[in-house]
Image: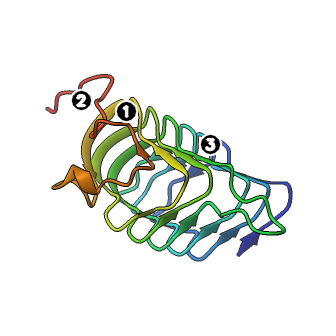
Amino acid sequence: MTFRGPRTTFIGARFLGARTSFQEAKFRAEVTSLERAALDGERITFAGAEFASQRITFVGTQFYAATIDFDDAQLGAPSRLHTRGTRETDFTQAEFHGAVTFARTTLGGRTVDFSEGDFFGDISFRTTRFAANEVRFDHPKAWVGAHFDWDDNPVRKPTCVKPNPWPPAPTQPPAPTR
């Protein structure tokens, strides 16, 4: 499926079924928004999806499904001769709980912002390609279970990934488990 036009919006949408699939979907509207959406249930997949909008927003989205994968997805498009490319992909204040993977995903465009995110679960950025000019993880609410290729060797962290020093410090301690 291909989404075109000025806007593709799922603002405040609730995806609660056993399986929701955007596999191989192409998001080519000028603005693509899943702002404040709730992605819950057993499995949500964006595997192989292409997000080529000028602005892509997941602001305040709740990634709560048991498994969510962006494997092999392209988030953000570079500027080309006849296109403006992606200015920003915005995950600010998104909540990543459960198992979320960005395996072999390309994060492109000018900026990708995960600032003030809530990372609590098994969130994998292993084998992610950080191709944007800047990728931010500033001021996370929680930072538990986020995994990167440079976990063992911070020197391997791409220079476009912020903050420095790494890893980012949570703004509040994680809630106690019962």
Query: Disc 3, disc 2: CB below 8 Å?
Result: no
Query: Disc 1, disc 3: CB below 8 Å?
Result: no
Give the Cα separation between the discs numbered 1 and 3. 18 Å
Which residue bears the numbered disc 1? 140
Which residue bears the numbered disc 3? 35
Q: Residue at x 67, y 44 (%)?
A: 11
Crowd class of label 3 (few under 14; some 14 to 19; many from 20; radius 10 Å): many
| Amino acid identity at mark 3 | Glu
Tag 2's secondary structure?
Answer: loop
Instruction: Using residue 120 as the reference point, say whether residue 79 is left or right of it.
Output: right
Give the Cα separation between the discs numbered 3 and 2. 24 Å
Give the position of the N terminus as an image quadrant.
bottom right
**Quarter-wise, where is residue 122 in the image?**
bottom left
Instruction: Using residue 142 as the reference point, say whether residue 162 is left or right of it.
Output: right
Tag 3's secondary structure?
Answer: loop
Measured along the vertical axis of the image, is residue 173 above or below residue 118? above
Tag 1's secondary structure?
Answer: loop
Which residue bears the numbered disc 2? 174
Measured along the vertical axis of the image, is residue 171 above or below residue 58? above
Residue 89 point in image, percent of width and height? 60, 49
Give the Cα separation between the discs numbered 2 and 1. 11 Å
| Amino acid identity at mark 1 | Pro
Between marks 2 and 1 in the image, the one whose residue lies nearer the viewer: 1
Residue 52: tell me if it is visible. Answer: yes
Measured along the vertical axis of the image, is residue 116 above or below residue 83? above
Q: Earlier in the sequence, mark 2 or mark 1?
A: 1
Residue 39 point in image, percent of width and height? 50, 52
Give the position of the C terminus as an image quadrant.
top left
Q: Residue at x 31, y 53 (%)?
A: 157
Viewer-closest of 79 and 17: 79
